[in-house]
Image (spheres, helix red, strand yellow):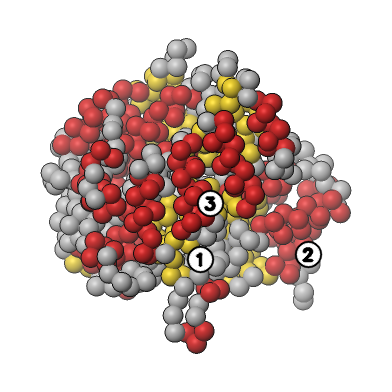
């Protein structure tokens, strides 16, 4: 078998029968491949110890479940087409963005010694390392595991890193939201795959296994309940074929939409009592960003509200929703396999009926009022508790490199701090004592963070995916182009005398890793130096943007946007750009975008 990590691969689309799926629908050959892998073990185990400089595509498919993608640096391929510059991208499991200080120090060392000397904070609140050679992969993962970290289930057809507001506030609903994110990560962690993971990377040392809380242990027993049980005793929740595709969860608190709550398979807004004890959650289901150009059957979608569930039942609910997706997600066509398509095809009413009839027997009440919601970012200095502070540092595209990376590592070591990563690809230094604050601030000023709470407005919430040269799906630039894009739009706004910011996101392909379809202005790669133009998302991330231009050349950027910006200015810019676009309507916006086009 030879499976590429591409949606169009004909081999993946071939249908065979495969065990463990409850609805007995046709399924792709790839599903049988997972079942035959002995819980994500072979051929990865065999290839890990051979002398090849890269894994075969079969092993690559399993490698994802262990947190790694194999990549080829397109700019360093051998001349004459005789070979590729193979390397591994490694992604960590950091629920709620938490990175203990010792782990951050270890990652700094590993990236310098066995990577490309950079770290990258992702839009899912975890660190990625790049440039790891195949022969060093085991050493890197083993060191991470032994340094309080993990890469298990950071990629693959499984629940991914669970997001939550990164702010380490010890007040309100924030502690409960962070705890819930950790509990969800543990309750949805694969049972047998974790054993495979420890066997492969730390020689089976079970002392590094996930240590769930008593509450998580109780809820994991419910994986044997009718409906939720896969029929496989070794992997009771997932079964031997795991999920049809990736699965994403996030938690937050009322009013804080730092996590883009509507873009996840499951989004939970936590409500607590005055003592901070979890009372229940508003539940949103069926969000997702991935799509394919020129294929209308794939699309970005925001999640539907399905109701409010009591706190004591939330972990059972999350397992039940995952089990429903396990059984009814499309296993024949991977492009159509996310939970969002189940919701779209079958409807919210069907989903709730199926969920409560077969998987989850507790009550689902009406949604509770959450009040006004904004995009929080926690940049600058904030009081964490009576005796502690944290500081949010802006990192454009999340990239840590050079002097800043090294000095942040020194600060973490010197003051015994922890790190938290935000969904906006920024970094928080946490647990700074009152007596340490001035010293930490001085050290930060020395490396350019003199006023971290006030970055340049356009860059403050801008996101970009890595794209070229490493991502195999990238059609054009994103991360490396973002600084230029910000400068160009900033200069244009100044020229037009517009003193207003815009929520900007850029991706090198339509898969949506930087969640572009929620932005006020997004560029989505559609060819070399060409992008789709999306407009109309909201500043608080509660509305999808709309595609307007299919292939806009970068040379046409200012000329295309100027009429729209001028119309925005004429309205007094009292509205955000996204609201202005929505109010104008598609036809008027399109006429403005094309008014300067060559005849």
Closer to the camera, 125 or 376? 125
Q: Residue at x 65, y 31 (%)?
A: 440
Mark 3 or mark 2, whichever is nearer to me: 3
Residue at which label 3 appears: 119
Of tags 2 and 1, the one toward the viewer is 1
Residue 470 marker: 1
Residue 165: x and y, percent?
51, 33
Query: Disc 1 or 3, which lies upstream in sequence?
Result: 3
Q: Position of residue 151 (x, y in %)?
A: 37, 48
Image point 52% across, 31% down: which residue? Answer: 416
Identify the element where label 1 is drawn.
Answer: loop
In front here: 161 or 198? 198
Image position, residue 343 (x, y; %): 37, 47
Q: In the rendered view of the protein, which quadrant contains the C terminus?
A: bottom right
Going 60% across and 60% down the picture, which residue do you hit? Answer: 478
Circles 1 and 3 in contact, beta carbons < 8 Å: no
- Expressed as whole percent of the image width and height from the top left, the position of residue 379 reads 64, 35
Residue at label 2?
A: 559
Disc 3 packing (10 Å; few <14; some 14–19; many ≥20) = many
Q: CA distance from mark 2 to mark 1?
A: 31 Å
């Amino acid at each position: 078998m030879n499976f590429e990590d591409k949606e169009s691969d004909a081999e993946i689309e071939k249908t065979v029968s495969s065990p463990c799926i409850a609805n007995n629908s046709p399924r792709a050959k790839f599903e049988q491949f997972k079942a035959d892998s002995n819980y994500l073990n072979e051929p990865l185990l065999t290839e890990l110890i051979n002398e090849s400089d890269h894994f075969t595509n079969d092993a690559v498919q399993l490698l994802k479940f262990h947190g790694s993608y194999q990549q080829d640096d397109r700019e360093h391929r051998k001349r004459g087409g005789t070979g590729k510059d193979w390397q591994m991208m490694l992604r960590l499991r950091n629920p709620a963005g938490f990175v203990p200080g010792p782990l951050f120090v270890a990652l700094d060392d590993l990236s310098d010694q066995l990577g490309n000397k950079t770290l990258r904070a992702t839009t899912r609140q975890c660190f990625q390392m790049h440039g790891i050679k195949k022969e060093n992969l085991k050493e890197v993962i083993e060191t991470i595991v032994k340094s309080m970290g993990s890469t298990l289930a950071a990629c693959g057809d499984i629940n991914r890193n669970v997001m939550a507001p990164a702010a380490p506030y010890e007040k309100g609903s924030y502690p409960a939201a962070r705890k819930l994110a950790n509990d969800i990560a543990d309750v949805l962690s694969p049972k047998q795959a974790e054993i495979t993971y420890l066997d492969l990377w730390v020689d089976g040392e079970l002392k590094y296994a996930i240590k769930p809380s008593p509450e998580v242990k109780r809820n994991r027993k419910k994986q044997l309940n009718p409906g939720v049980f896969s029929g496989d005793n070794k992997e009771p929740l997932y079964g031997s074929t795991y999920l049809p595709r990736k699965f994403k969860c996030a938690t937050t608190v009322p009013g804080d939409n730092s996590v883009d709550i509507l873009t996840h398979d499951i989004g939970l807004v936590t409500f607590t009592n005055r003592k901070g004890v979890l009372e229940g959650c508003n539940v949103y289901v069926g969000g997702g960003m991935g799509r394919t150009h020129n294929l209308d059957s794939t699309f970005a979608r925001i999640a539907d509200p399905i109701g409010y569930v009591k706190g004591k039942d939330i972990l059972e609910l999350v397992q039940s929703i995952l089990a429903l997706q396990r059984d009814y997600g499309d296993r024949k066509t991977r492009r159509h396999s996310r939970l969002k398509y189940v919701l779209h095809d079958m409807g919210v009413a069907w989903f709730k009926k199926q969920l409560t009839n077969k998987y989850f027997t507790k009550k689902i009440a009406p949604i509770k009022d959450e009040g006004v919601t904004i995009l929080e970012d926690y940049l600058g200095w904030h009081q964490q508790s009576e005796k502690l502070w944290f500081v949010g540092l802006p990192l454009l595209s999340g990239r840590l490199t050079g002097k800043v990376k090294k000095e942040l590592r020194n600060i973490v070591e010197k003051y015994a701090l922890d790190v938290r990563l935000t969904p906006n690809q920024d970094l928080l230094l946490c647990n700074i004592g009152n007596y340490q604050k001035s010293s930490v601030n001085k050290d930060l000023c020395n490396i350019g963070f003199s006023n971290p709470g006030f970055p340049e407005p356009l860059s403050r919430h801008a996101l970009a995916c890595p794209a070229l040269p490493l991502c195999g799906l990238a059609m054009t630039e994103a991360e490396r182009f973002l600084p230029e894009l910000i400068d160009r739009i900033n200069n244009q706004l100044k020229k037009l005398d517009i003193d207003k910011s815009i929520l900007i996101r850029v991706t090198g392909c339509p898969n949506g890793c930087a969640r572009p379809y929620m932005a006020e202005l997004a560029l989505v790669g559609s060819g070399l130096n060409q992008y789709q133009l999306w407009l109309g998302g909201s500043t608080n991330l509660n509305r999808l943007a709309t595609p307007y231009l299919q292939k806009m050349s970068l040379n046409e950027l200012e000329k295309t946007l100027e009429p729209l910006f001028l119309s925005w200015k004429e309205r007094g810019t009292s509205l955000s750009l996204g609201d202005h676009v929505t109010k104008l309507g598609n036809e008027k916006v399109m006429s403005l975008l094309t008014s300067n086009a060559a005849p």
